Amino acid sequence: MYLSRVPPELGAESLAKQQGFRNPATLIAAATGVSTGDASRLVKVGEATAPRSDLLGARLPAKYPLVSEALDSGALGAPAAAMIIAALDRCRIVAGVERIAEGERMLAEKAAGLALDDVRKLVVRVEAWLDPDGLEPQEEDRRNKRVLSLFERDGMVHLNAVLDVETAAPVVTAIRGFVTAAFAARKDTPDADAPDADRRTVPMIQADALAVFCAHVLGCERRVPVAGATVIVRMNLDDLEAGTGSATVDGVDQPVSVGAARWMAAGGGVIPCVLGGDSEILDWGRERRLFTRAQRLALVERDGGCAMCGLPPEMTKAHHIRWWKRDLGPTDLSNGVLLCETCHHRIHDNGWEIRIDAAGSGSGSGSGSGSAAQVWFIPPRYVDPERTPRLGGRARFDIAA
């Protein structure tokens, strides 16, 4: 129980002072061994989720009752609740009571069962939805802070970069694509134990990627291997036309404003993609073994990257749910899923099942395609005796706008 949830007649401040501490945060820090900053966040969680009283002593619900319920039931941990409460507080004045209540509902429901890093992704998206006009001034501030420094020391050249989302998006996408291509080439090498085998670490490959890209710019005569990496900026068409809302960049957690999205689109290389349109065949049956580029874009729209662990799209491959050879599975969207190599092996080696459900109930029969469908992972019985379906893909972080 948080210190702020002590009986109202005693009060958290009074309790702390009785124990000889300046405030509740310092008491919690001393008692639990956490930092004062972490203790302050716990105090705010307690204050925001504890029952309140008005000036006449009448009982009032907690400031954030849904977060309080999720916290009491164990669906949310204290760090996740602190993150959610901080975001709601930041947007409270701008968004208004009704929109804040809707934001609390989305966060309390969708954050349950997510790892803290995934909760952070969800929080930044909901915060952008609550205060879309706040993105642009933040972006201008971040843009003005971008920097890349180079200096020599101990015979090495050091590069340090701090980049805003728009500047970083092509950099991140290209380097990740290069790393993926390098690992794919390593996997195809016949003798991995040969003296000249590629044993570079990921940071080494990333450094080599930067060198290759710069050399390519200087010479511009050969194609650079980046495993089909593409920068994809996603935004609702109505928002784009109206100049409202926000956009997301695949592989980057921080949403961007509509102005930033338009600026990135104006930079070139944007290809319109209408999923399910007449101009592209998205289901190939048994006619083709490999998924097409159009199909992969449709899978990225649905899965957002690795549908299981969330790695960005350029670090995944499109896999058949029902295997091409063993099960005679078709190359259709309803039979495809984006997975990184690790999750691919985890699923096939450990008895997990995958279902694609157009209705989003987790009990579908494997039908549905495109962004309306959802991916569900069914754990083996030794992981979960009930085999409760776990939602995967982009739907874990989508919010009802």
Image (tube, rainbow, N blue to C red):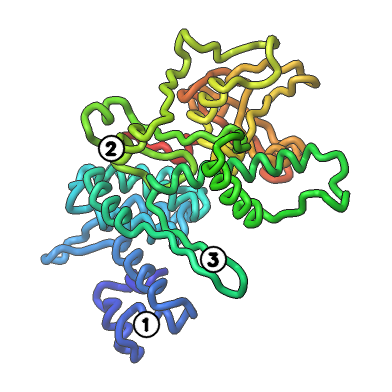
Q: In the rendered image, which quarter contains the N terminus?
A: bottom left
- Front tag of 1 and 2: 2
Q: Amino acid at mark 3?
A: His
Q: Residues within 10 Å of mark 3 (few under 14, many from 20)?
A: few
Q: Secondary structure at mark 1?
A: helix
**Whole-percent x, y for residue 145 in the image:** 33, 59
Residue type, numbered disc 2: Val
Cα gap from disc 1 to disc 2, whole angstroms = 42 Å
Disc 3 to disc 1, how far (Cα)?
Answer: 40 Å
Pointers 2 and 3 in contact (C-beta within 8 Å)? no
| Residue pictured at 43% horizontal, 57% vertical | 80
The answer to which image quadrant residue 56 occupies is: bottom left
- Comparing 143 with 287, the one in front is 143
Give the amino acid type for the residue marked by disc 1 in the picture: Thr
**Residue named by callout 2:** 258
| Mark 3 element type | strand
Please state which of the two labelled residues, at mark 2 or mark 3, is closer to the viewer. Answer: 3
Residue located beneath label 1 in the image: 26
Q: Secondary structure at mark 2?
A: helix
Residue at image location 63% in from the left, 37% down from the top: 225
Who is closer to the viewer here, 208 or 292?
A: 208
**Reading the chain from its start, which is encountered first: label 3 or label 1?**
1
Q: Which residue is mark 3?
A: 158
Q: Is residue 3 above or below residue 364?
A: below
